[in-house]
């Protein structure tokens, strides 16, 4: 594969975005761990959960978990879509891709469809 085609490779771009996103996930995980330790300290000192949540110590764990979930869903969808397209362009059938991914052929068809294409 030439350097030019690698630069345009949608699957490699999706993997790079995922890789950078995982760095963000590590940051969120670190914040979650700090928040857990903080909650444990405050509970040991007798604070109620209401007091802890109302103390404006942000971000809340639920907020960080929501951000993480949304980000992973987005990166995962991008990687799945790009990988399906790469395999299809290399000659695999939708059925073969579906078997590799553990999904239906209809799901692969949806992954291969470009965003501006009608269903």
Image: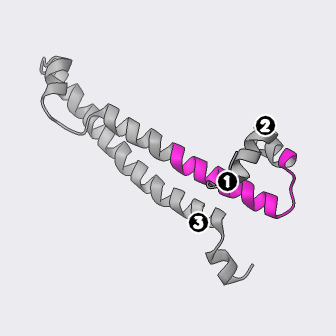
Direction from residue 75 to residue 31 in the image, left or right: left
Element type at mark 2:
loop
Kindly state the secondary structure of the residue where label 1 is placed. Answer: loop
11 in relation to 39, above or below: below
Q: Label 2: which residue?
A: 104
How far across and down, in percent of the image, does residue 96 sit?
86, 47
Q: For the residue carrying disc 2, how many other residues have a C-alpha within 10 Å: few (<14), some (14-19), or many (20+)?
A: some
Residue 117 - label: 1
Q: Is residue 87 magenta?
A: yes
**Mark closest to the chain's N terminus, 1 or 2:** 2
Quarter of the image holding residue 67?
top left
In space, the residues marked 1 and 2 are separated at their CA atoms by: 20 Å
Residues in magenta, as a range: 73-95
- Image quadrant containing the C terminus: top right
Which image quadrant: the N terminus? bottom right
Q: CA distance from mark 1 to mark 3?
A: 22 Å
Q: Which residue is rendered at x = 83% and y = 48% of the image?
A: 94
Mark with earlier residue (2, 3): 3
Residue at point 78%, 37% (across, down): 104
Q: Label for residue 13?
A: 3
- Side of 42 relative to 118 (left or right): left
């Amino acid at each position: 594969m030439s350097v030019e085609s690698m630069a345009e490779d949608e699957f490699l771009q999706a993997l790079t975005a995922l890789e950078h996103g995982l760095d963000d996930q590590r940051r969120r995980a670190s914040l979650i761990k700090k928040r857990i330790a903080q909650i444990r300290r405050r509970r040991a000192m007798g604070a109620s959960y209401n007091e802890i949540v109302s103390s404006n110590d942000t971000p809340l764990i639920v907020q960080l978990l929501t951000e993480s979930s949304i980000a992973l869903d987005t990166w995962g969808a991008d990687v799945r879509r790009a990988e399906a397209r790469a395999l299809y362009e290399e000659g695999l059938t939708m059925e073969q891709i579906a078997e590799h991914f553990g999904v239906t052929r209809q799901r692969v068809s949806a992954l291969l469809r470009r965003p501006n294409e009608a269903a």
